[in-house]
Each structure stands twice: as structure tokens, then as C-alpha cells.
């Protein structure tokens, strides 16, 4: 069954990376939540794509320079407007930046895909501690663009699935066929855009290469239902979307 990830939650309808966005995505039929993690000054793992609060909350402060208490004063809905153009506003509605621990408790059965943005050993240790304390290793895939971050996560004995870093994905895509068998793959899922840096990933050749290594393949960010079906026909195992309301019906997902 193809997995539908809600990228930052139902980000087309609700302020991204908030519990409201996550809950809405599941209501629409998403199977899993994709989100991003940063570390506060006092060592708390919070869910935000950006390293500062400027874009979403109008606060230019860096998360790394703030305590959790400070971050929780930010209005995560302040600058959000629904993609539909509807006049609905989320400013002043009490939406805030959640912690990873909160999200895992709030949605105890939901798979999460967490992009670890901060590569520091302190961040990696904090993320692993949160996931382990929640007993959630098997439902939390840890991802990063940085291969070294993922290597550190695996070396720390993480028992759950991991994605592949950019260098690992490039090796899979570009290695000559005769050398492909020598590539050792430690992750579980290759998560890629349709194309990047001149490499087209949305091909049966790339997907077959990944499947040959025991990897599932997830594509981001796909908001077009027709494109999602094309990718599934090529063999894609997962689709990440900002707009589960549009994509879920095409993939046969039922509202939760």
C-alpha cells in the first residue's frame, strides 16, 4: 500500500508543523506525518522547518537562542494564509510550536517522518532520547539531508528506520550498474524530489535500483493528484504532499 505523508501536516490548510495541521492531515486520510526538528537553547526538541520564527510567527529570533518557554510565546498561526485563498485566519488562535514529545503523545498510533535539521551531537542525542522515552522507535523514521547526521544516528544504535542522506542517494542514482552491487545501504527509505541537481529521480530505473537494495521510495512534494498516480505507476512507495485533501482521494485514502 502506498504511504501518504502529510508534509508538515496539512500545510495547505493549517499552519505548518502545528498539532492542528497534523490532526487535519489525518482527518483527510494521510497515513503519516512528515515534520522537521530543531533544538531550543534549553535542549528541547521542537517541530519547525525554519531555524527562526520569522516566516511563520513574525519573530526573527533563532530557535537555538531561545528557551522552550520563549518559543511557546510565538503565534505559529500569525502569518499563515490557506492556499485556497479563503479569508480564514489562524492568528491569535493559540497555535504554537509543538515539541516532538507532545506530538508523539498526541498521536500515539501515527507514523512520523522527522527531518533532523540540527546536525550537532546534542541535537541527535536529544531526538533519540525523546523517541525512546515515548517507545516510538518503530514508528519514527529519522531523516536528514546530511549523510553524516544519519550515520551518527545509526551509530548511536537507533532501533527505528532511517532515511538516506543526499550523498547516499546520489551514489544510488549515479553509480554504474556494475558497481551498484558493491553499495552498502543502511537506511530504509529513499526520499527524493522529482528531480534535483540535474538528476531525474522520478524514473522506473531509479526506483528499481532502490527496490533492488531493499529500499522504499518516497517522493516530495507532490500536490497534483495526477502526478501522484504517475509516480505510483512507476513503483513509488510513498507520496509526500502539502495538500492531502487533493491527493488522498486519488490514492484511495479514506478520511479518518
Image (tube, rainbow, N blue to C red):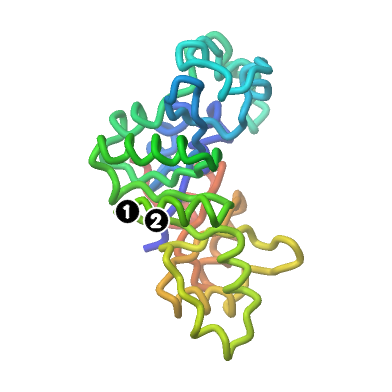
Q: Quadrant of the C terminus?
A: top left
Residue closest to the far right? 198
Tell me the residue that label 1 is attached to: 157
Above/below status of 68 relative to 189: above
Residue 240 is tagged as none
Above/below status of 13 relative to 33: above
Say which of 127 and 156 sits in front. 156
Q: Residue at x 43, y 32 (%)?
A: 24
Q: CA distance from mark 2 to mark 1?
A: 5 Å
Q: How many marks?
A: 2
Residue 250 in picture, x, y percent from top left: 49, 56
Tell me the residue that label 2 is attached to: 154
Q: Residues within 10 Å of mark 1 (few under 14, many from 20)?
A: few
Q: Residue at x 43, y 46 (%)?
A: 113
- In the picture, measured across the screen, residue 168 lies left or right of residue 29, that is right
Above/below status of 102 relative to 188: above
Q: Residue at x 26, y 41 (%)?
A: 109
Residue 173 in picture, x, y percent from top left: 62, 74
Q: Residue at x 47, y 59 (%)?
A: 238
Q: Quadrant of the N terminus?
A: bottom left
- 2 and 1 marks in contact (CB < 8 Å): yes
Does dot 2 land on a helix, a strand or a loop? Answer: helix
In which quadrant of the rendered view does residue 28 lie? top left
Does dot 1 land on a helix, a strand or a loop? Answer: loop
Above/below status of 151 relative to 243: below
Amino acid at each position: 500500500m502506498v504511504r501518504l505523508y502529510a508534509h508538515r501536516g496539512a500545510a495547505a490548510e493549517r499552519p505548518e508543523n502545528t498539532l492542528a495541521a497534523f490532526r487535519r492531515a489525518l482527518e483527510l486520510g494521510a497515513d503519516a506525518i512528515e515534520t522537521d526538528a530543531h533544538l531550543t537553547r534549553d535542549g528541547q526538541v521542537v517541530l519547525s522547518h525554519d531555524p527562526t520564527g520569522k516566516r511563520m510567527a513574525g519573530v526573527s529570533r533563532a530557535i537555538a537562542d531561545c528557551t522552550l518557554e520563549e518559543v511557546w510565546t510565538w503565534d505559529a498561526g500569525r502569518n499563515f494564509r490557506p492556499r485556497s485563498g479563503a479569508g480564514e485566519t489562524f492568528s491569535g488562535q493559540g497555535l504554537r510550536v509543538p515539541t516532538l514529545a507532545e506530538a508523539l503523545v498526541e498521536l500515539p498510533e501515527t507514523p512520523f517522518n522527522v527531518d533532523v535539521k540540527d546536525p550537532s551531537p546534542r541535537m541527535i542525542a536529544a531526538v533519540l532520547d525523546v523517541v525512546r522515552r515515548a517507545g516510538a522507535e518503530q514508528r519514527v523514521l529519522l531523516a536528514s539531508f546530511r549523510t553524516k547526521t544519519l550515520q551518527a544516528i545509526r551509530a548511536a544504535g537507533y532501533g527505528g528506520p532511517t532515511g538516506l542522506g543526499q550523498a547516499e542517494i546520489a551514489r544510488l542514482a549515479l553509480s554504474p550498474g556494475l558497481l551498484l552491487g558493491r553499495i552498502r545501504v543502511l537506511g530504509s527509505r529513499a526520499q527524493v524530489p522529482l528531480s534535483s541537481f540535474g538528476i531525474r529521480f522520478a524514473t522506473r530505473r531509479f526506483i528499481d535500483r532502490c527496490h533492488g537494495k531493499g529500499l522504499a521510495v518516497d517522493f516530495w512534494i507532490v500536490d497534483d493528484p495526477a502526478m501522484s498516480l504517475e509516480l505510483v505507476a512507476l513503483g513509488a512507495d510513498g507520496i509526500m504532499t502539502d495538500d492531502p485533501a487533493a491527493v488522498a482521494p486519488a490514492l484511495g485514502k479514506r478520511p479518518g
